[in-house]
Image (cartoon, rainbow, N blue to C red):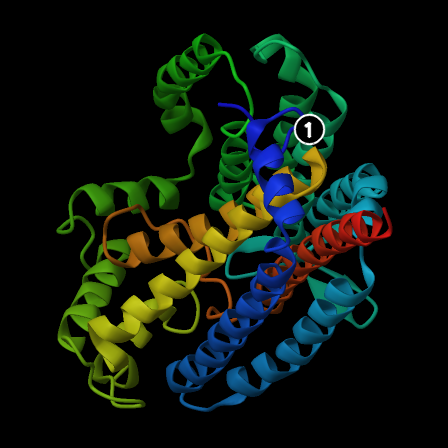
């Protein structure tokens, strides 16, 4: 597959011809406004849903503090950061994240049996969340600098794979197999938009399949194996990991088409649904707002991904385009995995639902991702306006 925004591609030529016809100047600002509206919907629904999931206790008010920081970060990134700034700071950001992840392993804060949080003065967060954006930046810069006139093969990607692999290796021991694997998914999505030798892809897929038994034997911890067994067999460990998924299915199913209404979810408020504020937050929303409410959330995330891909298609550089693709993958795939997880279509991985799950680091990271998409769209729009002005002068 060929990247949509390579200077010689027919896609960019098509967009340029439309711009010359004068219609693209009118259409382009719609992307930013559309993202702003969807962003407002998701973050508002997330806050209201968390209020219900927490019963309005201190978790909700902590979430409001996180929202202030997250929205402030979104505004700063959207208004003042340019794609060129991100590109020039990519490897510095990568180095800082690696240092932070090493610090987590050495002296991180332990919570829920995991060592994932780093405290520096008044600041406390999970560096692994920011790694989702940084890994997208790394892949985007790599392909913007390593351009070939032939399909990429495994040997061409060894540096990128090593950099991504290092991040995953630093995250796995926290332990956080979900996030470490998720970084690979983000980069894989970006690679799919490049001209890749599919024989190399087949070799990687075959190697991964061969490595699965070894991973099961030597890499997975007992609780991670239990999650997978509970996914394959709902009756396995019905009082442990299997119980969580079964209660999630009961909550979602009892919501029906229209839901039970705000604060009326019995599975949630009678404390049958575990981790209702984090991993299974979507179950709370589905129980109270039903299939229609869940469909609105699905459509919202699908629209974010669709708009991000349009922004990628219109971007003036490989870096901006692939970064937009990576952010689309981050937001939509994380949403899809979380929902599949609570529907027993995927093993429980501990990946949060962006904008909904309790946790400041993920909320801030998701808001920054939307801010970067708007920043890229602004940069694209400036390019088109500049070309239009030059045409008028000529």
For this rendering, which residue is in front, 389 or 176?
A: 389
Question: Dot 1 lies on which element?
Answer: loop
- Residue 131 in sight: no
User: What is the quadrant of residue 138 in the picture?
Assistant: top right
Between residues 202 and 238, which one lies in front from this camera angle?
202
- As drawn, 136 above or below 22: above
Rendering quarter of residue 126? bottom right
Judge left or right: residue 305 versus residue 85.
left
Provide residue 23's location: percent of width, then percent of height.
59, 55
Above or below residue 342? Residue 163 is above
Residue 272, horizontal then vertical, whole percent: 24, 76
Residue indicated by mark 1: 7
Residue located 30% across and 52% down the image: 340
**Is 157 above or below relative to 284?**
above
Look at 73% across and 33% down and name the residue there: 141
Q: Nearer the viewer, residue 289 or 373?
A: 373
Please identify the residue farthest to the front as the structure is shown.
394
Q: Is residue 350 above or below residue 78?
A: above
Whole-percent x, y for residue 301 in the image: 43, 60
Task: Report crowding for label 1: few under 14, some 14 to 19, many 20 or more residues within 10 A (C-alpha).
Answer: few
At x 49%, y 28%, the residue is 192
Residue 73 visible in image: yes
- Labels in figure, total: 1
Give whichever of 250, 46 is nearer the camera: 46
Rendering coords of residue 394 (x, y %) = 85, 46
């Amino acid at each position: 597959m060929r990247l949509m925004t390579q200077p010689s591609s027919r896609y960019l030529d098509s967009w340029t011809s439309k711009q010359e016809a004068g219609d693209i100047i009118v259409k382009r600002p719609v992307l930013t406004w559309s993202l702003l509206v969807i962003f407002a919907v998701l973050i508002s629904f997330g806050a209201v849903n968390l209020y219900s999931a927490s019963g309005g206790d201190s978790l909700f008010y902590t979430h409001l503090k996180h929202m202030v920081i997250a929205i402030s970060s979104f505004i700063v990134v959207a208004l003042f950061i340019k794609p060129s700034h991100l590109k020039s700071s990519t490897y510095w950001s990568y180095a800082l994240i690696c240092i932070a992840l090493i610090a987590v392993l050495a002296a991180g804060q332990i919570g829920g049996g995991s060592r994932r949080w780093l405290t520096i003065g008044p600041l406390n967060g999970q560096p692994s969340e920011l790694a989702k954006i940084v890994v997208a930046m790394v892949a985007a810069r790599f392909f913007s600098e390593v351009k070939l006139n032939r399909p990429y093969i495994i040997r061409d990607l060894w540096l990128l794979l090593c950099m991504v692999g290092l991040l995953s290796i630093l995250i796995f021991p926290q332990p956080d197999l979900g996030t470490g694997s998720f970084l690979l998914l983000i980069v894989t999505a970006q690679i799919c938009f490049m001209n890749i030798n599919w024989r190399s892809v087949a070799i990687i897929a075959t190697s991964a399949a061969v490595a699965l038994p070894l991973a099961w034997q030597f890499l997975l911890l007992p609780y991670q194996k239990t999650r997978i067994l509970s996914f394959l067999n709902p009756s396995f460990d019905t009082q442990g990991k299997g119980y969580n998924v079964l209660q999630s299915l009961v909550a979602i199913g009892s919501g029906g088409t229209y839901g039970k209404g705000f604060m009326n979810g019995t599975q949630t408020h009678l404390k049958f649904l575990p981790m209702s504020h984090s991993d299974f937050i979507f179950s709370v929303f589905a129980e109270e707002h039903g299939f229609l409410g869940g469909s609105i959330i699905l459509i919202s995330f699908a629209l974010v991904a669709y708009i991000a891909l349009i922004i990628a298609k219109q971007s003036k550089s490989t870096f901006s385009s692939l970064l937009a693709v990576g952010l689309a993958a981050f937001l939509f795939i994380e949403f899809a995995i979380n929902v599949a997880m609570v529907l027993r279509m995927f093993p429980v991985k501990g990946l949060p639902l962006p904008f909904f799950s309790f946790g400041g680091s993920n909320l801030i990271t998701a808001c920054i991702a939307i801010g970067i998409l708007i920043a890229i769209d602004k940069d694209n729009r400036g390019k088109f306006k500049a070309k239009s002005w030059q045409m008028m002068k000529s």
